[in-house]
Image: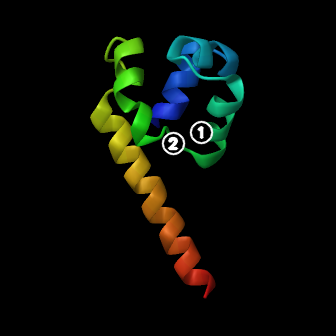
Amino acid sequence: MKPIDKLIDMYTTPTQAGRAIGVSRQVVEHWIKKGFIPYEVASKVQEKTGGSITNSQIWCAADKAKSALKAKKGNQN
């Protein structure tokens, strides 16, 4: 399960997840749309989830998502 999916699973809604992390619902919905949690909030997410979602899980998922996006853009040319 991707960290963003796990975050929503833990907090039930983007609103509740946002409150727990200290960001707006819209920010969490943007993460859902992108498919990953940004590197910049990895430590905060790890802290607020009590380590259920770790920095390394967030970084790995973000790297995979960004690599997939680059590959997709490369195939469009």
In the shown orientation, is residue 25 left or right of residue 46?
Answer: right
What is the x, y in percent for residue 74?
53, 80
Quadrant of residue 67 within the rendered picture: bottom left
Amino acid type of the residue that numbered disc 2 sits on in the rendered structure:
Phe
The C terminus: image quadrant: bottom right
Residue at the spot x=52%, y=33% of the render? 4
Count of numbered badges drawn on the protein? 2
In the rendered view, would you say 47 is above or below 26?
Answer: above
Between residues 35 and 45, which one lies in front from this camera angle? 45
- Asked if marks 1 and 2 touch (Cβ < 8 Å), the reply is yes
Between residues 11 and 21, which one lies in front from this camera angle? 21
Q: Name the residue under label 1.
A: 31
Q: Mark 2 points at which residue?
A: 36
In the rendered view, would you say 64 is above or below 39?
Answer: below
What is the x, y in percent for residue 52?
35, 18
Q: How crowded is mark 1: few (under 14 residues within 10 Å), some or many (20 or more)?
A: some
Residue at the spot x=62%, y=30% of the render? 28
Which residue ends up furthest to the bottom in the rendered image?
77
Instruction: Decide which of tag 1 and tag 2 comes sooner along the chain.
Output: 1
Amino acid type of the residue that numbered disc 1 sits on in the rendered structure:
Trp
What is the x, y in percent for residue 50?
34, 11
What is the x, y in percent for residue 65?
48, 54
In the rendered view, would you say 77 is above or below 52?
Answer: below
Which residue ends up furthest to the left in the rendered image?
56
